[in-house]
Structure formats: C-alpha cells, structure tokens
C-alpha cells in the first residue's frame, strides 16, 4: 500500500469505531505519533547549516557501495585498535 492508501484505510477504521473509549485511545496513540514525528523534525531544524551539509554529503556518499565498509571490517579495525591502545599505568 502506498501512503494515500494507508491513510484511507486508517480513516475507514476510525469511522467504523463507535465506542468513545476506543476512539480516545486511537486519538491518544495518533497524537503521540504525530508529536514524536514533529519532535524529530524539529531537531533537524536546530542543526547548524554546516552540520546539515555534512549529513547530506554523508548520505549521498553512502549511496555509492564503494564508499561503504562492511560490519566485519569495522569490528576488525576496532579489535586492532584495542590491541594498539594500551592502558596507562597508574
């Protein structure tokens, strides 16, 4: 289903609810989801433009498979770093 179809089905479900308690639960649930989404959107707006540009660049670069590193390789590098970095003596 695409977004429009999903919204249509949700609307149909809501129109079929007659119990006020269930309607209130649906309202509370959807209100919480909308608030969470708006909260996430607000964080993007508070970022400095330089950070937004860097994030956009990283997203574009991540679309090219040659720029990606496998999880295996990342963990291998982390394990090697732990061996190299020795704790300081007290």
Image (cartoon, rainbow, N blue to C red):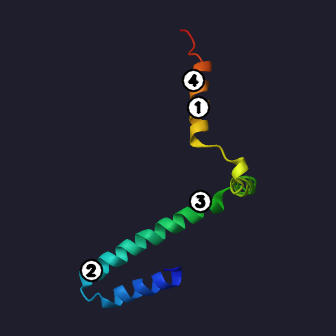
Q: Nearer the viewer, residue 81 or 52?
A: 81
Q: In the image, residue 16 lies at what x, y percent?
A: 31, 90
Q: Are marks 3 and 1 in contact (CB under 8 Å)?
A: no
**Which residue is found at the position 35% from the left and 85% from the top?**
13
**Which residue is found at the position 41% from the left and 69% from the top?**
32
Numbered mark located on residue 22 in the image: 2
Dot 4: element = helix
Q: Nearer the viewer, residue 35 or 83?
A: 83
Numbered mark located on residue 24 in the image: none
Dot 4 corresponds to which residue?
Answer: 82
Dot 3: element = helix
Q: From the viewer's perspective, is the residue at label 1 or at label 4 nearer? A: 1
Label 4: few (<14), some (14–19) or many (≥20) C-alpha neighbours in 10 Å: few
Q: Rounded to the nearest whole Å, what is the CA distance between mark 3 and mark 4?
A: 34 Å
Dot 3 corresponds to which residue?
Answer: 43
- The answer to whether residue 79 is above or below residue 20 is above
The mark that comes first in sequence, 1 or 4, is: 1
Dot 1 corresponds to which residue?
Answer: 76
Q: From the viewer's perspective, is the residue at label 2 or at label 4 nearer? A: 4
**Which residue is found at the position 46% from the left and 81% from the top?**
6
Q: In the image, residue 11 lies at what x, y percent?
A: 41, 87
């Amino acid at each position: 289903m695409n977004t429009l179809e999903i919204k249509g089905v949700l609307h149909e479900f809501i129109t079929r609810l007659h119990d006020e308690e269930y309607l209130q639960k649906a309202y509370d649930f959807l209100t919480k989801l909308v608030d969470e989404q708006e909260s996430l959107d607000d964080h993007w707006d508070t970022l400095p433009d330089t950070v937004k540009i860097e994030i956009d660049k990283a997203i574009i670069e991540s679309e090219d498979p040659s720029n990606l590193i496998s999880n295996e390789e990342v963990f291998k590098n982390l394990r090697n770093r732990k061996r190299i970095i020795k704790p300081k003596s007290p």
